[in-house]
Image (cartoon, rainbow, N blue to C red):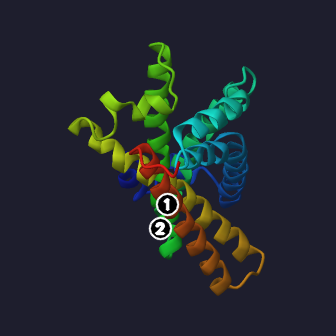
Amino acid sequence: MAMIVLPGSRSSSAASAISPVGYRRLGVAHGVSAVAILLLFVGPHIGNHLAGFWSGSVHIAIMNVVRRVYRDDMVQPVLLALIGFQILSGIVLVRRRMTLPGDLFSTVQTMCGAYIGVYFLAHMTAVFAARYAGTDTNWSWLTRPNDSLLFSLLKLRLIAHYWVGPIAIVAHLACGLRWILLQHDISPATTNRIAWALITAGVVASSLILLALLNVHIA
């Protein structure tokens, strides 16, 4: 994050080479890519983890269905390419945003965007390393009795990691949606309420996911 923020406070030849129109087009492409990732992976994945609050068996049953989509031999490379584009385009947009004045929501969007880039890289590295080693990254990967989140002090860092990640994703999307609504002449009061409602829903959903990962279930 320091590599993104500190150079972003100074104008560079690379940044100045992109016109305001170019930044707007990049922002639109970034948003379209985000919607595709949300539909293909993030939405089903968060819903899948929420189902774990009911029971681990329900989570695994849903996982076996949604995996047929985002682990498809044709879908997965496209999904990884979209995530790569999100990270690279996000770095450019964050550096641009750091040079501009903004309100609370734009600051939250920028901070969450930077964190999401780190979160995706860390998450994918762990998953693909486990899959390469022959481990099925299913519900038992994090919740097995002898190696759960609370079993080892070294795993305590994952509690914050898994709790903040979904919140950052929802908050980033909520702030982006707020900006789009403002461009369509929706009143700031209404857009602020929508953004706060979505962020609150993200906090609640992420907290339920964390409880499920800590083996707290309804059934």
Kind of residue at disc 1: Thr
- Report crowding for label 1: few under 14, some 14 to 19, many 20 or more residues within 10 A (C-alpha): many
Q: Out of 126 and 213, give the one closest to the viewer.
A: 213
From the image, tell me which residue sits under label 1: 110
On the image, the x and y values in percent for residue 87 come to: 55, 42
Q: Can residue 95 be seen in this view?
A: no
Give the answer, above or below, for where 190 lies relative to 139: below
Report the number of discs.
2
At numbered mark 1, what does the secondary structure look like: helix, strand or loop? helix
Between 205 and 27, the residue placed more toward the observer is: 205
Looking at the picture, does residue 12 appear above or below residue 187?
above
Q: Is residue 91 left or right of residue 210?
A: right
Please tell me whether residue 167 is drawn above or below residue 66 in the rendered image. below
Q: In this view, does 215 lie above or below 190?
A: above
User: In this view, which residue lies farthest toward the left?
Assistant: 153
Residue 67: image x %, image y %?
Answer: 67, 30
Please tell me which residue is depicted at 71% across the width and 40% down the height of the picture.
40
- As measured in the structure, the alpha-carbon distance from the residue carrying label 2 to the one carrying label 1 is 5 Å
Find residue 72 and report its horizontal and vertical position in percent.
Answer: 72, 24
